[in-house]
Amino acid sequence: MSRNDRQSPATVEHFCREHFPEHFTGVAVEQQTLLVYRRPHSGFDRRVRAEFPHLSRFVDSDSSRRQLVALQGRVRADHQEWLDRGLRINSIGLTADRVIVGVRSADLTRARPAIERYGPAVLVQASDPMLA
């Protein structure tokens, strides 16, 4: 495996998900800097730095990927409830950096208060009204 493959976001993500599922949130690349989102844990940082010494930066996160996937499942499970209340949710998924669950709706005025029950790890975002 070349050094570039060894330092790829996919390789780092695989390692972190396998060894630290309760702390790892996600990876992102920002202007050629590899960001590793994780719930702060000194053992995580030491082990990942030892495995990937050229890693660019750790970023604190409130939730692990495992917690966010479970939260995403809760929101999806309630989808019919939102439809029954006349609220169309166009998409539910982890954001690109995978640090929160994104919910898209054309009706932000009604969606934001309805989604608040899931806590701050869920963000309601605007979607194209044509998709509603």
Image (tube, rainbow, N blue to C red):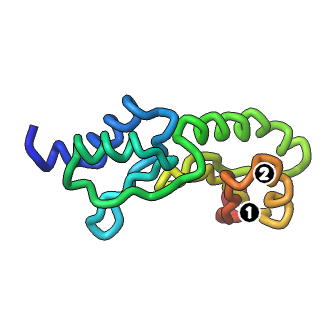
Residue 47 location, quadrant: top left
Which residue shows up at 89% across the image and 41% down it? Answer: 84
Residue 53 in the image: state x and y as whole percent: 20, 50
Q: Earlier in the sequence, mark 1 or mark 2?
A: 2
Quadrant in which the C terminus is drawn: bottom right
Which kind of residue does numbered mark 2 sit on?
Arg
Query: Tag 1's secondary structure?
Result: loop
Crowding near pointer 1: few (<14 within 10 Å), some, many (20+)? many
| Corner quadrant of residue 29 | bottom left
Please report contact status of discs 1 and 2: CB closer than 8 Å, yes or no: yes
Disc number placed over residue 106 in the picture, else none: 1
The residue at which mark 2 appears reads as 88
Quarter holding the N terminus?
top left
Task: Measuring from the top left, give residue 14's x and y in whole percent.
Answer: 33, 35
**Farthest bottom residue?**
31
- Which residue is painted at 75% across and 51% down in the image? 119
